[in-house]
Amino acid sequence: DLDSLAYDPGITLPPRTRVYWRVSVWGDKGDFAQSEANWLETGKGNEKWDGEWISSPDPAIHPVLRKKIELEDDVESARIYATGFGVYELEINGVKAGDEFLAPGCNAYDKWLQVQTYDVTELLSKGENEILAWLGNGWAKGRFGLMMAENNYVDQFSLLFELRVTLKNGKEIVIGSDGSWESAPSPVKDSGIYDGERVDARVKLESWAPVKLLAPECGELSDRLSLPVKIMEEVKPIAIIDTPAGEKVLDMGQNMVGFVSFKPSEPEGAKLSLKYSEVLQEGNFYRDNLRSAIAEFHWISSGKKETARPRFTFFGFRYVLLEGFSDPKLEDFTGHVLYSEMERTGFLETSHKDANRLYQNVIWSQKGNFLDVPTDCPQRDERMGWTGDAQIFCETSAWNMDVYAFFSKYLHDLALEQGKHEGRVPHVVPDVRPRGSGFSGIGGGACGWADAAVVIPWTMYQFYGDKTILKRQYSSMKAWVDWIESEDKRAGNKGLWTTGVHFGDWLSLDSEGTSRFGGTEAAYLASAYYMQSARIVSETAKVLGCAEDAEKYAKLSERVRQALLSEYITPSGRLAIRSQTAHVIAIGMGIAPEHNERLAKDLGRILVRDGMKLTTGFLGTPLLCKVLSDTGAHAYALKLFFKEDLPGWLYEVKQGATTIWERWNSVLPDGSMSDTGMNSLNHYAYGSIADWMYRRLAGISPTAPGWRKARLEPLPCKELTYARASFNSPMGLYKLSWERKADGTITVEGEVPFGASAVLVINGEEQELNPGTFAMDLAPFAQKLDPGSIPLGVLMADPKAGPILLQIAPFLKECPENIIQLGIREFQREAGALAIFGKIDYDAIIGMIAKALE
Ligand code: BGC
């Protein structure tokens, strides 16, 4: 039957065909509605090509390939089907075909290659037409990947092309790439994802020579799965800075990904360059954190007024060092923001300026790192599809934008790469590695990273309600869990995952010394993910109606859970690993739901022990505030979230960040970079906090796949006077806002889409909401903490209450954990009479602290 979330009409469409569709709805009472007509167009499918792979006869140059054609009549319609290596750009009669950049995109080229379709009806006309294909290095051919090798997939530039024209007179013409094409040296002298581009605009396209025919070097050709990478926004620079070192640096005002274009008015032969960076140091241009990535654009002027821009690269930057310009002006430069074409779906705003900026930073880090592949970072010599980062951030990304198609393509590659290793998922997808080296990639099978294979499809199903992604990924999901189980067997079948190399709670603040691997035992984290992934596969099997698998993986998950319990958790619920991350994982993943209360209490104690400072890394952070809010410690989550000094989310905002940083302390309080070894300023992992912001600052959460049901729970807090959010779900638009008026009353407003159902929760009381809008005024309520019950350790860590408390009771500094976990009243009851603490007026202290916390 029909389902408004996902419907498979069960038809196979013919190739190269435009299909129109609309939706009609008849209501029970005779209502009728009809959508606008929409269309989609199929590609070549498995059809045979009327074209061959062609290349330049000179492998040492960047080539431009050309074909001239004569059309005897006007054009009714025209399509180009094309693909190429490394990256290509088509131009017809001097105009770029389509608005896509960096085609054919980045994927496991040895397995499959994506074909793009271009509607070029408007670009061709009666008479002579010139078709050019510009070729550049890109991901497949240039220097790319952790091994820093070149030509990972191919040695030569190449193009496969087919033009199909229908003329007004009814004639059909097919032009394929073949031996009649020509090749000439390109004005592009060099290009690379990491290293930028060199263009000599003086080079004229001449010295044409016949092309060379090539044998294909790729896996199967396929209609594209990836979304096109486009210029999604433009940014005008805000200043040209004269630095202390005497240089001119363009400030875009925003850390962004893409490139800057300009129209040089310099004489012929003038050498201009743009060098890209994320941050200034002591006011000067600085880019050590890009490591070996050169990230420069060089342009030798032709003397003509023309737009200068790179074709085959992108940069992650806020600042651009300008060299060779005689008199650069702000208005000469435009920033172009490149990312995969995705629609914004979620919006959030609060009364807190810095929280809003943080939210915008998350959005910008998503834009910057959703450029065909979900990358760790967009600027240094990595820019790869790290599975862990994608796993951590996928849920947040699905709030912000429609990422279903984006992740469908990534997961397609993930499954293909996994196939090579009996189910083990590589650390990066595509698993870029030097060809023919016998080297099987940079490795894989790390907990929390490889689990992307199950977490991402499951999250997509939760957000979009479409089972297709589960069907497609099912064998990949199972293969991954089976692989872990084989490791478990190898290690003696204890139900734990104790083997392998893990990144663990990567970059957490509780690791030993300068280790990046985090302070929480790897085998614990690995086994927790093992349990969770087996459970997700079991749930997936249920959704797909595979009862046997559902039972098998549920049993496996329970076996792992029991093993975790006996290894790490005492019968009364004490966890052997005393870290924040170990506790949020235990609660968030449901290792011992029967002990959640105890675990939550202990998490609170640990936070107190840690001075109310978070220590979590990549695996703990996404769950930290969520778990606190879910276990009755929402006030603690707020405390961590609104903390303005190190470590915390708002610290980087206070430091002027415009994207999310890789480390909590990427930039130190004095403005200097903390470590040039690994310090990206545009890394989305810690941006996963936006998921909590939607759920807990604004109060919207999905409670059924595809947002058929939702929970709306405004939670007014003292840090905010209002919060509002909306989410354009597959069911339709959800909205919720709350605002505290001057008299303390709270206005709540919202909207539930047609066909969906929601519960509104006010102060713990639930009520059903019907689709449509709602609004109400409520008597004042807020999440309040009684200062008498706040643990002393929490108060000590508070910038306002701490100094007051410590002035009156300086001895607290020397008190052990079991004492500072107590609230003031408890302390008074238990120890207040002890002479060693002297005479203390408890009521007065509580009064002063309540005032300080107001
Ligand atoms: C990346 C990370 C990634 C990590 C794995 C780093 O170099 O930038 O984000 O997940 O390696 O250890």
Image (tube, rainbow, N blue to C red):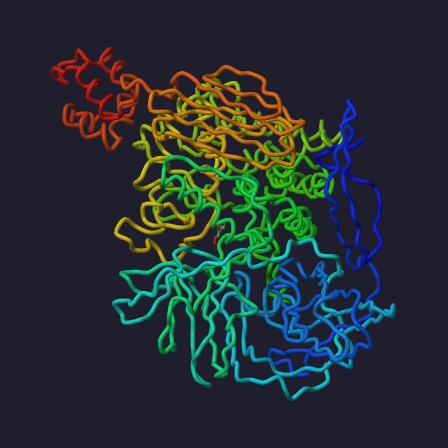
Task: Give the quarter of the figure containing the C terminus.
Answer: top left
In the displayed structure, would residue 106 be above or below residue 398?
below
Q: Quadrant of residue 319?
A: bottom left
Closer to the camera, 668 or 482? 668
Residue 406 vs 284, above or below: the answer is: above
Q: Quadrant of residue 1?
A: top right
* Image coordinates for residue 643, horizontal then vertical, percent: 33, 36
Q: Residue at x 63, y 47 (%)?
A: 407
Residue 776 in the image, given as x and y percentages of width and height: 48, 20
User: In the orientation shown, which residue stands out farthest toward the right?
Assistant: 170
Q: Quadrant of residue 45?
A: bottom right
Judge from the rendering whether residue 534 lies leftward or rightward of residue 168; answer left or right: left
Q: Is residue 758 left or right of residue 614?
A: right
How many callouts does the rendering have?
0
Pick the residue in front: 135 or 171. Answer: 171
x, y (%) of residue 794? 29, 27
Res. 580 visible in picture: yes
Q: Give left or right: position of 304 versus 226.
A: left
Residue 577 is situated, as x and y percent measured from the top left of the image, at 43, 31
Indicate whether 283 appears above or below 300.
Answer: above
Residue 19 in the image: above or below residue 292: above
Residue 521 can be seen in this image: no
